[in-house]
Image (cartoon, rainbow, N blue to C red):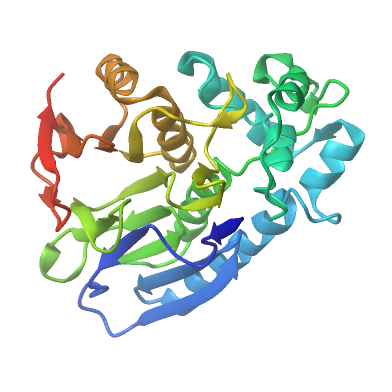
């Protein structure tokens, strides 16, 4: 079995961390949520703000680590109920799940664990095993009462498709109390962009090619959050076949939707993270149909038939990279 697990790379990169003209700049690199994160801030309180952002992320990592026996999430999965921030986050994720046709589901931990994506003990579960485990999944089965979440017996939650986006929201809120002029906070596959870089220009956020080195394209961004999901991020191979970590909740198997990566741009980190996963599972046609019915996000889809699909709201801010795919601009 060949294993390949990327834990230390960002799949969204910011090209040229030249921040607004200010002498007070602060950069911090650290490891959290299974990836290397980077904080780049400029402003009078950049150093203090970077420290606060790092502490915020570290706290969330401790709370939401599904395998850490000392985490709040581990306690929830053991006791089958919890209150406070975890219950609030679970409610927000369920609210996002409702219109997505089952393509985003925080109850998939029993399935991900069976595949080994959370433990690195990779294996291909049998169809019978997956069928049995799917009985213990389904966001509709979660119950909420008195600011608490309750799980049916055998259910376990995993916020892997939401944690980094949620972290971006929390960091942005934390930074509002500091004198910050601009900056970028990279949380693996999610990037929080604050303000603009020097000369009042947007930051150039690069979308990695899902089929090798280089970039699919660049998005000019300011004051927004961008998340990317792709089957190239985390996977293993067995019997000559690749199995990636983005599970289709309807089958319990890695999604085979024809998409290679999905990038979502929106004001909400939690929504951007969740949607990048959900649209990946939907596939091109359903993803674009969902986008046309919505008015709160834009997207870039990289397809298996060599297309880079850019939605209308990004038509002026997207620049093609060195990936030799055809760019298609979609209108509402």
Instruction: Name the one closer to the observer, 70 or 309.
Output: 309
* Image-based side of 80 in relation to 253, left or right: right
Q: Name, please, the residue furthest toward the front.
A: 239
* Image-based side of 150 in relation to 97, left or right: right
Q: Position of residue 40 (x, y in %)?
A: 38, 72
Q: Position of residue 63 (x, y in %)?
A: 73, 52
Q: Position of residue 19 (x, y in %)?
A: 25, 73
Q: Quadrant of the C terminus?
A: top left
Q: Residue at x 20, y 60 (%)?
A: 204
**Residue 44 is drawn in which quadrant?**
bottom left
Q: Residue at x 49, y 45 (%)?
A: 242
- Can residue 55 be spotted in the picture? yes
The correct choice, above or below, for 209 with respect to 115 in the image is: below
The correct choice, above or below, for 197 with respect to 85 in the image is: below
* Image-based side of 36 in relation to 195, left or right: right
**Residue 179 is drawn in which quadrant?**
bottom left
* Image-based side of 167 in relation to 285, left or right: right
- Can residue 51 be spotted in the picture? no
Q: Quadrant of the N terminus?
A: bottom right
Q: Residue at x 86, y 54 (%)?
A: 69
Instruction: Name the one closer to the observer, 169 or 122.
Output: 122
Q: Name, please, the residue furthest toward the left.
A: 316
Q: Position of residue 23 (x, y in %)?
A: 28, 85
Instruction: Name the one closer to the observer, 81 or 330.
Output: 330
Q: Residue at x 33, y 23 (%)?
A: 287
**Residue 262 is drawn in which quadrant?**
top left
Instruction: Name the one closer to the observer, 109 or 24.
Output: 109
Q: Name, please, the residue furthest toward the right.
A: 79
């Amino acid at each position: 079995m060949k294993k390949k697990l990327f834990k230390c790379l960002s799949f969204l990169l910011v090209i040229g961390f030249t921040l607004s003209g200010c002498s007070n700049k602060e950069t911090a690199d650290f490891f959290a949520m299974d990836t290397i994160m980077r904080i780049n801030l400029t402003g009078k309180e950049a150093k203090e703000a970077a420290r606060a952002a790092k502490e915020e992320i570290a706290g969330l990592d401790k709370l939401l680590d599904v395998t850490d026996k000392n985490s709040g999430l581990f306690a929830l999965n053991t006791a089958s109920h919890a209150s406070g921030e975890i219950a609030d986050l679970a409610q927000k994720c369920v609210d996002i799940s409702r219109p997505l046709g089952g393509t985003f589901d925080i109850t998939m931990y029993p399935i991900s664990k069976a595949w080994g994506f959370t433990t690195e003990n990779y294996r291909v579960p049998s169809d019978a095993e997956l069928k049995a485990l799917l009985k213990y999944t389904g966001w509709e089965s979660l119950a909420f009462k008195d600011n608490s979440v309750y799980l049916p017996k055998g259910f376990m939650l995993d916020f892997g498709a939401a944690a980094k986006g949620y972290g971006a929201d929390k960091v942005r809120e934390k930074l509002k109390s500091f004198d910050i002029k601009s900056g970028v906070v990279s949380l693996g596959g999610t990037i929080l962009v604050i303000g603009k870089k020097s000369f009042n220009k947007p930051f150039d956020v690069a979308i990695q090619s899902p089929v090798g080195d280089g970039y699919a394209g660049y998005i000019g961004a300011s004051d927004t959050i961008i998340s990317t999901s792709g089957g190239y991020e985390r996977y293993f191979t067995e019997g000559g076949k690749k199995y990636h970590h983005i599970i289709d909740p309807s089958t319990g198997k890695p999604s085979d939707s024809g998409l290679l990566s999905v990038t979502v741009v929106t004001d909400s980190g939690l929504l951007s993270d969740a949607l990048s996963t959900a649209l990946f599972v939907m596939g091109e046609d359903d993803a674009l149909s969902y986008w046309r019915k919505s008015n709160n996000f834009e997207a870039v889809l990289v397809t298996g038939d060599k297309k880079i699909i850019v939605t209308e709201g990004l038509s002026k801010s997207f620049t093609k990279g060195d990936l030799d795919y055809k760019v298609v601009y979609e209108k509402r």
